[in-house]
Image: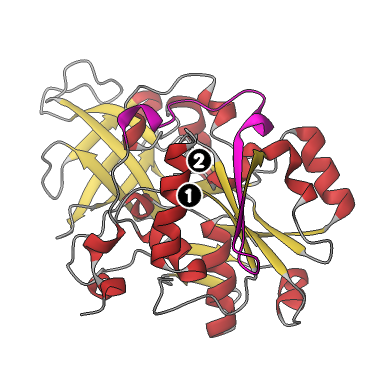
Amino acid sequence: MSLDLLTTSYDYTLPKEFIATCPIQPRDHAKLLVYDRKSDKITHTTFQYILDYIPRDCHVFLNDTRVIKARIFGEKETLDTPKEGCTQGGGKVELLFNKPLDAHHYLVLIRGKVQIGAKLIFDDNLVATVTALNEDGSRVVSFTHKEKKIRFEELVLVLDQIGHIPLPPYIQREGNKQDETDYQTLFAKNAGAVAAPTASLHFTPSLFEDLKEKYETHTITLHVGAGTFKPVDSENILEHPMHSEYFHIPQSSTHILDTNVPVLAIGTTVTRTLEYYVRTHKTQGECNLFLNPSNPPQRATHLLTNFHLPKSTLIMLVSAFIGREKTLHLYKEAIKHKYRFFSYGDAMLIL
């Protein structure tokens, strides 16, 4: 089997102190590694100078998804649990919303054992009823609020009141009020993500205005799901069951994608969305595209991204642009220069 197909070939050793647990302030003072494929040149700079490196004729694509407060804490219902409270419940429970499946059913992750029919009671009279247990550990629930079934649009409003920003598991700390700002892009608009499109977190208001003034910018929506953190467990990367996430591309953006102008994808989520469109010509639906060296990009000409987990689909996506060996070499360079890794970490621009 080719080394490019072996999951273990995407492993690297990262000292724990290189995992960023909060962002650099100001955001654009994060380090930026620029790699030019034509010249094979590596440049170390900071994000505030990124516009000096993006080719002038590029169209820039961003993900306008908004991270919702998807993490909620409650209790399991017992026979003596009061309907409007959760003070006498049958054990504490943590639920992480993932995505809607239809008008009234939602895919979630639940910490703690539950059975079909179990009711989980949260603040503000929000109740989740378990309707299915999936083999991968995920659960399906329906939600009622004040004894009425609610749709996603109503659920988001409730979660905004009682929920918590779902920080990635590797940050290993409780979220706080500051994360509600830090773990959200400046242009977040459409609610639905449970993880931020982190390459965009480095923009400050002034730098973002400069970007829009200098380049044609376009937005797409891909609601990043919990599957983005799912490790690749299979020996062969092609046997990994890729997660799917809802996306939407406005017509103004597809018009550009149907040309051959250079495109900078701000982040892996944008990349997957654009590449899915090129392959299927669908402008909305579920994207489950897995980019890797055996399935390289066809439309995105440049990529801005953070530094990703070992053996993850995201480091494999970067390898789809520049090859696995070069990717691992750049990661070693980043560690050597004390870059900060993962969601709140530093960035890399591939030209």
Q: Which mark is residue 152?
A: 1
Q: Where does residue 272 sit, x and y in percent of width and height?
A: 51, 67
Q: Is 120 positioned to the left or the right of 18 in the image?
A: left
Residue 171: image quadrant is top left
Residue 41 on the magenta span: yes
Q: Secondary structure at mark 2?
A: helix
Q: Amino acid at mark 2?
A: Val
**Mark 1 and mark 2 in contact (Cβ < 8 Å)?**
yes
Secondary structure at badge 1 equals helix
Q: Residue at x 57, y 55 (%)?
A: 267
Locate residue 232, reporting x and y percent.
25, 60
Residue 195: % across, % down: 46, 44
Residue at the limit of the structure toward the top, as seen here: 87
Q: How is the image coloured?
A: secondary structure
Amino acid at dot 1: Phe
Relative side of 120 to 103, left or right: left
Q: Is residue 346 visible?
A: yes
- In the image, 63 versus 189, the foreground residue is 63
The part of the chain drawn in magenta is 15-42
- Residues packed near mark 1 inside 10 Å, few (<14), some (14 to 19) or many (20 plus): some
Separation of disc 2 and disc 1 at Cα?
6 Å
Q: Give residue 107's position: percent from left, percent from top.
A: 32, 53
Q: Residues within 10 Å of mark 2 (few under 14, many from 20)?
A: some
Please give left or right for residue 124 compared with residue 257 in the image. left
Q: Residue at x 78, y 61 (%)?
A: 55
Does 101 sit above or below residue 118?
below
Q: Is residue 86 above or below residue 272?
A: above
Q: Residue at x 73, y 36 (%)?
A: 48
Residue identified by numbered label 2: 156
